[in-house]
């Protein structure tokens, strides 16, 4: 996508951010575009800053988190999905933030459905619906972990031929002199692999 601000000088871009910030909800598309460009090109170094976060917080009293969301919103919905500015503005920044986590991991058909839902659903109703979806996803993830735990315990109890309380004692003996940093590293790697495998299995 051709940069719509390429004719602006660095100072003009910096001044534009200050002006657009005053009415963020109306200008979040243009603001997101400028912030995205400055972040990617590291233009903040022109002002003497080492990080994008330090730049936006010092120059515009804009939190690094919000600035990142504005940039990501532009990059996802306008650059990547090629939705026109008018449609994006009609949905609004708040509703876009609600659907963004789902859109980021969805396929193209699902993305279209999320955009349609955001257009047609009032903000409060959309928020409630997404809250229920997140609750359901969390429950499903918990169920999968419980299945994994139950399978592990059954295997270990059978192997050691002992009750669960005795198994906990044996595991405590095993871990008492273990390198806990190494254990933590292995657990994190295996948890990441488990979660990725779970996500792959859930995809149609």
Image (tube, rainbow, N blue to C red):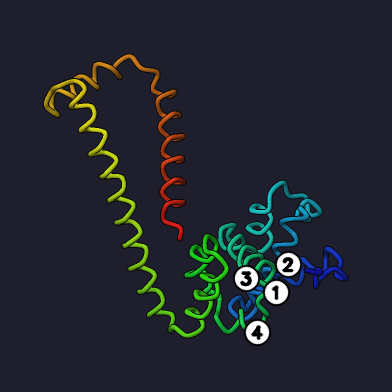
Residue at 24% x, 21% y: name it: 172
Q: Circle 4 sits on which residue?
A: 86
- SS at circle 3: helix
Task: Report x, y in % for residue 83.
Answer: 65, 76
According to the picture, the residue beneath numbered tag 2 turns out to be 34
Horizontal side, residue 194 vs residue 94: left or right:
left
> Residue at label 3?
77
**To which quarter of the image does residue 154 belong?**
top left
> What residue is drawn where x is 78% and y is 55%?
41
Label 1 residue SS: helix
Q: Secondary structure at mark 4?
A: helix
Badge 4, how many Cα within 10 Å: few under 14, some, many 20+? few
Q: Nearer the viewer, residue 52 or 49?
A: 52
N-terminal-most mark, 4 or 2: 2
Report the residue marked by disc 1. Answer: 30
Q: CA distance from mark 3 to mark 2?
A: 15 Å
- Asked if residue 33 is positioned above or below residue 183 in the image, the reply reads below
Q: Earlier in the sequence, mark 3 or mark 4?
A: 3
Going from N to C along the chain, the mark reached first, 4 or 1, is: 1
User: Residue 96 placed where, x, y %?
Assistant: 53, 73
């Amino acid at each position: 996508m051709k940069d719509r601000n390429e004719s602006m000088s660095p100072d003009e871009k910096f001044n534009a951010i200050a002006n657009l910030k005053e009415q963020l909800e109306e200008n979040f598309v243009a603001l997101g575009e400028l912030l995205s460009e400055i972040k990617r090109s590291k233009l903040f170094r022109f002002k003497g800053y080492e990080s994008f976060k330090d730049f936006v917080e010092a120059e515009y009293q804009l939190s690094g988190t919000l600035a990142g969301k504005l940039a990501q919103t532009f990059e996802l919905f306008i650059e990547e999905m090629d939705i026109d500015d008018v449609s994006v503005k009609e949905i609004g920044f708040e509703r876009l933030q609600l659907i963004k986590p789902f859109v980021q991991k969805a396929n193209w058909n699902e993305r279209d459905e999320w955009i349609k839902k955001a257009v047609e659903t009032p903000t409060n109703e959309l928020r409630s619906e997404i809250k229920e979806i997140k609750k359901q996803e969390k429950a499903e993830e918990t169920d999968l972990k419980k299945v994994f735990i139950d399978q592990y315990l059954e295997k270990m109890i059978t192997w050691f031929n002992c009750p669960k309380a005795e198994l906990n004692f044996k595991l405590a003996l095993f871990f008492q002199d273990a390198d806990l940093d190494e254990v933590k590293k292995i657990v994190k790697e295996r948890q990441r692999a488990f979660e990725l495998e779970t996500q792959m299995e859930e995809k149609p």
